[in-house]
Amino acid sequence: MLAEIVREIPGPVGSLEVLIDRPPGEPRAAVVFAHPLPTEGGSMHTKVVFQAAKALTRIGCVVLRFNFRGVGQSSGQWDEGRGEMEDYRAAVAYMAGRYNGLELWAAGFSFGSYIAMTAGADDDRICALIGIAPPVDRYEFASVKLSSKPKFIVHGEQDELISMKLVRHFYAQLQEPKELIEIDRADHLFDGQTSEVGDALEGLLADFTCKTQ
């Protein structure tokens, strides 16, 4: 497994700091992974983001994770989600251009799952939506609910911020195809259980391709 640091890519308000994880062989899909809320310390180095990116790389994906504006070395400042959505779209444009011809998947953790799944639902280049601990009580996810693209949700059974009950209700509103994995005893940050997030993604996506849907 190789990690390739790209110091910056063009963003809407300047450069975005990114890290690309690449599989040993030819990648089978490209993933753009968004991190949790910047105002709560979220970054592309958050443990869940790291473990998820590594898991996706193990099953043959090339994964771009990046820092939203104002985080790490990325230009700009927090923009209440609006600008962060544009940052995500810029990262998608970069990966779509660099890995033209590969399936493109949108993924994110917490706030990042709202950004990734919403942007992914609205972008014809993206064929799969992956959300870890989606904050379904804080954002509308309207376009995600309308989307017929494959959707994969991973959530902690004992998430103290977004209850499992709310996520099950959200999941029931999603169109097929869809899958939900609940991680026993896990809290919002999957403290002590981040490797289980990676295991869940491997189990869900090891044999997945959009072409079979």
Image: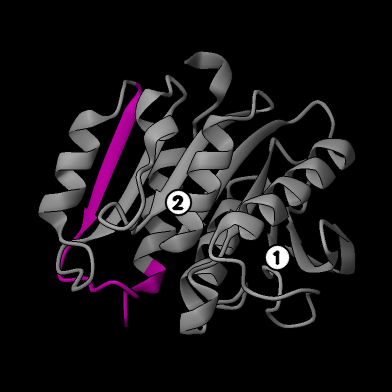
Residue 206 visible in image: no
The residue lying toward the viewer, choosing from 51 and 188, is 188
Residue 154, how many percent across, how many down? 32, 52
Q: Which residues are magenta?
A: 177-195
Q: Residue at x 51, y 61 (%)?
A: 52
The residue lying toward the viewer, choosing from 102 and 149, is 149
Amino acid found under the numbered disc labelled 1: Phe
Looking at the rendering, in which quadrant would you find the N terminus? Answer: bottom right
Q: Which residue lies under the disc numbered 1?
A: 66
* In the rendered image, the vertical position of residue 199 relative to residue 185, given as above or below: above
The verdict on residue 67 being magenta is no
Give the side of residue 173 with respect to residue 59, left or right: left
Give the side of residue 99 with respect to residue 209, left or right: right
Residue 104, how many percent across, how many down? 67, 35
Q: Which residue lies under the disc numbered 2?
A: 114
Mark 1 / mark 2, whichever is N-terminal: 1
Under tag 1, what secondary structure? strand
* In the rendered image, the vertical position of residue 96 relative to residue 189, given as above or below: above
Q: Residue at x 84, y 46 (%)?
A: 94
The verdict on residue 181 being magenta is yes
